[in-house]
Image (cartoon, helix red, strand yellow):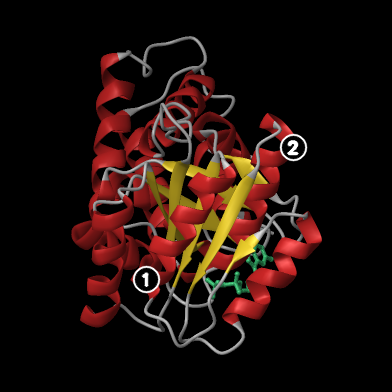
Amino acid sequence: MAFEGLTERLQKAMRSLRGKGKVSESDLRETMREIRLALLEADVNFTVVRKFVKNIRERAKGADVLEGLNPAQQIVKIVNEELTKTMGETDVPLNKSEKIPTIIMMAGLQGAGKTTTAGKLALKLKKEENARPLMIAADIYRPAAIDQLEQVGKQIEVPVFQMGTDIEPLDIVKAGLAQAKENHNDYVLIDTAGRLQIDEKLMDELKDIKAYAKPDEILLVVDAMTGQNAVETAEGFNDALDITGVVLTKLDGDTRGGAALSIRDVTNKPIKFVGQGEKMTALDVFHPDRMASRILG
Ligand code: GDP
């Protein structure tokens, strides 16, 4: 289960304060030390941990938790609020264009869940807004990538624009966008190529697509299971593409929490959706406050 270890350790860190009418400086110091270790063990970025712990400590002191009536409860409340803040405070909705189509570019490393997420998002838009999306298959390198997108399209009954693997991705995108205009599609989702790691060629290709398509939304899809690697990936893509949002996938797995808790703070870009399963319906809007409560258990 996701966050299991983190939840357990955070609860344990705060449990020692429970029942205490008064909390001493050293009790608080010990609790903060345990919270810090719990976060580091969950693979949260070191700088994020430091800032997080410092904020909690300052607030705990400022709020006179030590003299308060129920110190344990107050600390739990502060930790919850700071977790929420670290993950972005409020929900950030999908960017939309004033005139159709809204163009969404999906980016990410191979295996992160890009193609699956494109399908999930198209289905969500279709169901919730009665939208008529078009998906463009612009990953010409990975064998079977186009087939996979077509399968997904069939399953959710969303058309897929493709030109095989012999045409340059940018030209596919140009033709796909022209078709979307002609057909009055209100959303276009561009499934771009991924690689096993970030390389210059991939980034140049994505930059060219971005320059031409001028997407309203560049969603970076990252695998939450990969912890700090997900955060580094997000930094790399953000530096090159100035992404507009992140989708964290595989939160149904036993991710430790590092990616969820670090990405927003490190990249300053909002997590907009989370993937919680392989099914096409397993995509949810990201709510920082609900995620914080889930982490605290
Ligand atoms: P891409 O290479 O980035 O396009 O990745 P795919 O969309 O092909 O996904 C790679 C694998 O991850 C597939 O087996 C997906 O079913 C799986 N996957 C994607 N998102 C999720 C998710 O949120 N949870 C789980 N459990 N599996 C996922």
Decide if residue 9 is in sight here: yes
Of all residues, the one furthest to the front in this rendering is: 182
For badge 1, the amino acid type reads Asp
Residue ID for mark 2: 127
Q: Nearer the viewer, residue 106 or 225?
A: 106
* CB under 8 Å between discs 2 and 1: no
- Is any atom of residue 260 visible in this view? no
- Residue wearing tag 1: 171
Q: Does the residue tagged 1 have its C-beta within 8 Å of any atom of ligand 1? A: no
Q: Is residue 80 above or below residue 273?
A: above
* In the foreground, 232 or 116: 116
Which image quarter: residue 4? bottom right
Q: CA distance from mark 2 to mark 1?
A: 30 Å
The answer to which image quadrant residue 217 occupies is top left
Percent x, y for residue 215? Answer: 35, 47
Q: Nearer the viewer, residue 276 or 254?
A: 276
Q: Quadrant of ligand 1?
A: bottom right
